[in-house]
Amino acid sequence: MFYHRKELFKPVNVGTPDPQFGQFLLEQFGGATGELTAALQYWVQSFHVEDAGLRDMLQDIALEEFNHLEMVGHLITQHTSKIDQTKLRQAPLFAMKGIGPHFVDSQGSAWSATYINEGGNVVRDLRANIAAEAGARQTYEALIHHTKDAGTIAALTHLLTREITHANMFMKALDSLGKLDDPFFGTIQPDDTVEVVYNLSQGEDARGAWNEAPFKYVANPDATGKLPAPPMNPDDEHRRGAKAARH
């Protein structure tokens, strides 16, 4: 059951309307990293989850994202409600479509369901959600750097903060499943290259935790992708040489 209470999750008060900035804000309404994408993504994912606690978390966050979508919509409306002809030239999208939010991003490209990242596996979905929150946080940070309006900054800072909270919740959920730092999920067992890393970008190579033990590092991989034969110890090499000499 859904119902709508006609009050914002957090008040939105724009002091100095700026339609050009309003067009930037469309990125978080009808864009790939926007609130509509997140809300629908988490809501659909909740139907795939058997664990009641994880399902409840996904639904709670999904509904908060719908609240955020409403806040962004009000921000766009306030930034575009007082447009004169000079300002219209700076944000022609609103001249064509009218004030307020639309299902497009800041470049005028229509929102697409292809933005939604869900795959029916809770581990895979939670990882996708962490990435989604990171993308949204990056967009909000860019938006904050492009406005000086105090009311807008306050609203966007709150929205950015909630993205951090949600990412932390998704990481805690992964940790509860024992999958925060374990990439394996599903039922298909990996082959014998699961701990092998190949040096395929050679020249000024750098080493780090991503290509050191427990990984097996292949400095010069061949075309087969196989592991090189381990080095022979001196005794074995001597015995092989002696055997070859006898033949």
Image (cartoon, rainbow, N blue to C red):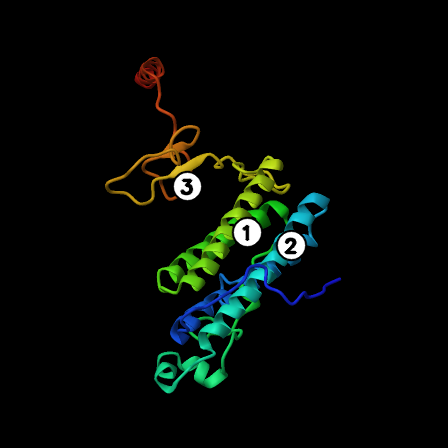
Query: Which element is circle 2 on?
Result: helix
Q: Are marks 2 and 1 in contact (CB under 8 Å)?
A: yes
Residue occupied by mark 3: 225
User: Residue 177, how many percent across, how many down?
Assistant: 62, 37
Label 1 sits on residue: 129
Name the N-terminal-most of marks 2 and 3.
2
What kind of residue is marked 3? Gly
Residue at image coords 45%, 73%: 79
Q: Tell me which amino acid carries mark 2.
A: Gln
The kind of secondary structure element at disc 1 is: helix
State how far apart marks 2 and 1 are (Cα): 10 Å
Q: Categorize mark 2 by other alpha carbons within 10 Å: few (<14), some (14-19), many (20+).
A: many
User: What percent of the width, then of the height, locates residue 235?
Assistant: 34, 12
Give the percent coordinates (x, y) of residue 15.
42, 69
**Residue for badge 2:** 45
Q: Secondary structure at mark 3?
A: loop
Q: Quadrant of residue 54?
A: top right
Q: Is residue 42 left or right of residue 241?
A: right
Q: Quadrant of residue 146?
A: bottom left
Choose between 84 and 39: the one closer to the eye: 84
Within 10 angstroms of label 3, few (less than 14), some, or many (20 or more) residues? few
- Foreground label between 2 and 3: 2
Q: Earlier in the sequence, mark 1 or mark 3?
A: 1
Q: From this view, report whether residue 32 is shown above or below residue 215.
A: below
Q: Name the residue located 62 percent from the left edge and 36 percent from the top edge.
A: 176
Within the image, what quadrant is residue 190 found in? Answer: top right
How far apart marks 2 and 3 lie (CA) works out to: 37 Å
Give the position of the C terminus as an image quadrant. Answer: top left
Using the rendered image of the protein, determine whether residue 231 is visible from the camera's viewpoint: yes
Indicate whether 107 appears above or below 180. Answer: below
Three-letter amino acid code at the position of disc 1: Asn
